[in-house]
Image: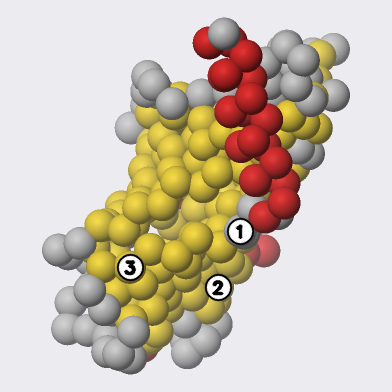
Amino acid sequence: MSRRRGASALAVLLAVFSAAGIVRAEVVQKGNLRAYFTGELHPRTLPRKGVAPISVSIGGRIKTTDRSVPPQLRSIAIALNRQGRLDYRGLPSCTLDEIQPSTSQGALAACRDSLVGRGDFSANVVLPQQSPFPSRGRLLAFNGVLHGRPVIFAHVYGTDPVPTSFTLPFEIDSTRGTYGTVLRGRLPEVTGGAAYVTGFSLDLGRSFRVGNSRHGYLSAGCPAPKGFHGVPFAFARVSLRFAKRTLTSVLYRTCKVR
């Protein structure tokens, strides 16, 4: 009886998610501070047992409801479901000195073999000479090593209002529970209201060859129970920490069994 009830509940949940199409932008608000979170994984059709290469897209946009200046963004944390695996063994790594400071073209010339993703970055720059950020920049993600630990270097370069580059290292941690991998990045402190972050996006995913075998930088399976062709799951949890507030959203998505 309990198994039948569990199966019925899962079937209803799948129907609700499918009918709704799953909202692609989740909104979280505390006080006047609001964030819009987005996330996807491709492909969604994955093996029930084992894993296959995937790509993951995560994004966030920051606004205030009264058009006031938002607080400074201090850190970004992206937690990925434990069904996903991150594999950088055998992938060339990059160092911070190779890409910072540098243009996007310069960073690619130095570390193209370590590229694992792309995205964008935006900020409101009030005092150009005091801001570590461009107002809008291209983001390149590289497999790297910092202080002997594996990281993802998120390199951003833009020319508005002045040519500026900065690199945000995302530390890679393994955890237990719903989420198996957490990426944590701390942004540089900005004083005097010179600039504040308004948004970012990051697309991670790459296949590469080690010897005679092909690897996926990210890979995953679809943990649907036997008899089901798909399942909704907590795909990712994204947290934006500000000076006095933290906005967090859990992104639920569905996968299908190959």
Query: Measured along the vertical axis of the image, is residue 94 above or below residue 194?
Result: above
Which SS class for mark 3? strand
Which SS class for mark 1? loop
Question: Which quarter of the figure has residue 108?
Answer: bottom right
Q: Looking at the picture, which amino acid does disc 1 mark?
A: Val
| Residue bearing the label numbered 3 | 29
Question: Which quarter of the figure has residue 210?
Answer: top right
Query: Measured along the vertical axis of the image, is residue 61 above or below residue 193?
Result: above
Which is in the foreground here, disc 1 or disc 2?
Answer: 1
Name the residue at 78% across, 39% down. Answer: 43
Image coords of residue 109 (percent x, y): 68, 54
Q: Looking at the picture, which amino acid does disc 3 mark?
A: Gln
Image coords of residue 249 (percent x, y): 41, 52
Which SS class for mark 2? strand
Query: Measured along the vertical axis of the image, is residue 187 above or below residue 221?
Result: below
| Residue bearing the label numbered 1 | 23
| Residue bearing the label numbered 2 | 137
- Using residue 103 as the reference point, say whether residue 165 is left or right of it: left
Name the residue at 39% across, 21% down. Answer: 177
Rounded to the nearest angstrom, the CA distance separating label 1 from label 2 is 27 Å
Chain-order first, disc 3 or disc 1: 1
Quadrant of image for the C terminus: top right
Chain-order first, disc 2 or disc 3: 3
Q: Looking at the picture, which amino acid does disc 2 mark?
A: Gly
Colour convention: secondary structure
Which is in the foreground here, disc 2 or disc 3?
Answer: 3
Quadrant of image for the N terminus: top right
Rounded to the nearest angstrom, the CA distance separating label 3 from label 1 is 17 Å
Mark 1 residue crowding within 10 angstroms, few (<14) / some (14–19) / many (20+): few
- Using residue 242 as the reference point, say whether residue 105 is left or right of it: right
Q: Are marks 3 and 1 in contact (CB under 8 Å)?
A: no
